Image (spheres, helix red, strand yellow):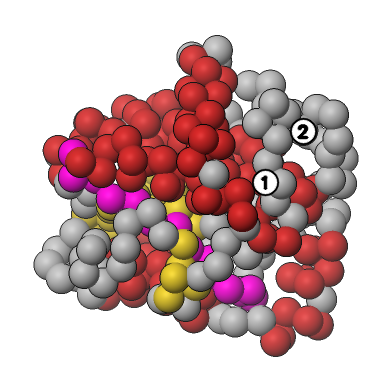
Amino acid sequence: MGHKTIVLTGASDGIGAAAARKLTADGHEVVLVGRSEKKTAAVADGELSAEYYLVDFANLASVRALAVSLLERYPRIDVLANNAGGIFGKERAVTVDGHEMTFQVNYLAPYLLTDLLMDRLIESKATVINTSSVAHQYFGNLDINDLDATRAYKSTKAYGDAKLAQILYTKELVRHVGSRGVTAVSFHPGNVASNFSSEATTPFKMVYTSLLKHVLASPEKGADTLVWLCEGTPNKDWTPGEYYVKRKPHKTNKQVDDAALAAKLWERSAEMLAATA
């Protein structure tokens, strides 16, 4: 397995914090990235004696600043785990960058962070891990001409679309830089008892904050596949470009097999980010 330097976003709570604890216990250098200074510091300083950075994925300038800091500090990055994300309210919200909140936080910001770190990831022969969701199967139906959901918005569809975009991007990333040593994979952690969706006014909030949360998996169980992917060897333990649930390849939305859609999404994402640079 060997010692790895692992940059983990969404590390202040839920499966991110659980994965950080396990990976640190296993001897890896885990760099925690979170939005809340209080919560991120509590895990990094209070529990793990690890370095941490703050970022707000609803602000792309914050993502760019994070990338600069990481490149200055870490000459090698073995794993970039894009784990941060969330679902938002019933009413469509727009970020300071002009994008629909769910799309930017779950997909566009991680895309940007990965792109900004790409040279370092190539040098390190790194793995990119994207935390997706089974919601991409039930709610995802990506419209390449309306990624910001300006014509019709539903919180569940916006979340499903963003998680579908993550999986499409994972496959396209392998096509673009797989020959240069970078591997990528996506996974669903399961329905986990955490603070996910606690701020949203959506059906997800009922599940994650009601009595139903007691039948959900623990953050530790939810983090199992993430830890396994971080510590595993691509092409031996798992297949680049695939989507995993409970350490096994899993069925996906039919749009995932649309290579032309994935290529268009890559191009459109780059155009959207260039407009906000």
In the rendered image, residue 8, in percent from the top left (x then y), is placed at: 38, 54
Rendered image quadrant of residue 165 = top right
| Secondary structure of residue under mark 1 | helix
Say which residue appears at 20% left-offset and 41% top-offset: 179
Q: Which residue is mark 1?
A: 161
In this view, 58 is above or below 232: above
In the rendered image, residue 37, in percent from the top left (x then y), is placed at: 51, 48
Q: Is residue 192 magenta?
A: yes
In the rendered image, residue 273, in percent from the top left (x then y), is placed at: 51, 21
Q: Which residue is mark 2?
A: 149
In this view, 188 is above or below 128: below
Using the image as rendered, state which of residue 131 and residue 252 is in the foreground.
252
Q: Disc 1, disc 2: CB below 8 Å? A: yes
Say which residue appears at 61% left-offset and 35% top-offset: 104
* The residue stretch that appears in magenta: 180-193
- Looking at the rendered structure, the number of numbered marks drawn on it comes to 2
Say which residue appears at 77% left-offset and 33% top-offset: 149
In the rendered image, residue 246, in percent from the top left (x then y), is placed at: 47, 78
Q: Amino acid at mark 1?
A: Asp
Q: Earlier in the sequence, mark 1 or mark 2?
A: 2
| Secondary structure of residue under mark 2 | loop
